[in-house]
Image (cartoon, rainbow, N blue to C red):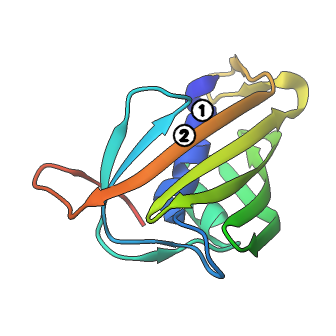
Amino acid sequence: MTSVRNTIVLAAFLGGAAAASAAPVRHAGEWETSIDGGKPLVACATHDTVFDKNSVPSAMAKVPNAKCTTTNFSNIGPLTTFSIQCEVYGAHMVSSGSMTQTGPDTFTVKSHTHVDGGALKIPNGQSIPMPDQDMTMVSHRTGACKPGDRMMSN
């Protein structure tokens, strides 16, 4: 289901993604993010957060029944590549992708997600179809946080 996939990738962003360098940092402030060209989401980061191999599993810990580990993480210049493996409601999921700095406090994340068996079982005993999915997320810092901004959980 697209919303589950978006939740996983957005959790990675909200948990710590940002402009790439030796250790990419999401700077404090208001961030606007579009997923696959959709309506932008706006949220406020209250402090700088380093994006490292522990950021994704830490962010995913907030998703019910998700247990994730980073299997690959590399920063080279403006490019960060990553791979994670998760168990979500007992299903094995693998996501991999890249984050590229495209300007000051601006980056693009491209990812691919695969769920073994093509479905996630949910607590009510039903399954949610999860075909292989590709996603592009574009994020940029717009400035200082504004009153009423949704706060990112770190």
Residue 102 in picture, x, y percent from top left: 56, 56
Q: As rendered, which of 9 and 117 lies closer to the eye?
A: 9
Residue 108 in picture, x, y percent from top left: 59, 49
Residue type at mark 1: give it.
Val
Instruction: Farthest residue to the bottom: give it.
Output: 22
Residue 17 in picture, x, y percent from top left: 54, 62
In the image, taking residue 111 as reference, residue 104 lies left or right, namely left
In the image, taking residue 47 as reference, residue 105 lies left or right, namely right
Q: Quadrant of residue 127?
A: top right
Q: As rendered, which of 68 and 149 lies closer to the eye?
A: 149
Does residue 64 appear in the picture of this structure? no
Secondary structure under the numbered disc 1 in the rendered image: helix
Residue appearing at x 13%, y 49% in the figure: 148
Q: As rendered, which of 111 and 58 lies closer to the eye?
A: 111
Q: Mark 1 and 2 residues: CB-CB less than 8 Å, in contact?
A: yes
For the N terminus, the quadrant is top right
Does residue 31 appear in the picture of this structure? yes
Instruction: Farthest residue to the right: give it.
Output: 117
Residue picked out by circle 1: 4
Residue picked out by circle 2: 7
Q: Mark 2: few, some, or many residues within 10 Å (few <14, many ≥20)?
A: some
Q: Marks 1/2: CA distance? A: 5 Å
Residue type at mark 2: give it.
Thr
Residue appearing at x 89%, y 26% in the figure: 117
Secondary structure under the numbered disc 2 in the rendered image: helix
- Up the image or down, 78 lies above or below 147; here it is below
Report the disc number at residue 77: none
Residue appearing at x 25%, y 61% in the figure: 143
Residue 20 in picture, x, y percent from top left: 60, 69
Q: Mark 1: few, some, or many residues within 10 Å (few <14, many ≥20)?
A: few
Q: As rendered, which of 19 and 114 lies closer to the eye?
A: 19
Residue appearing at x 46%, y 75% in the figure: 49
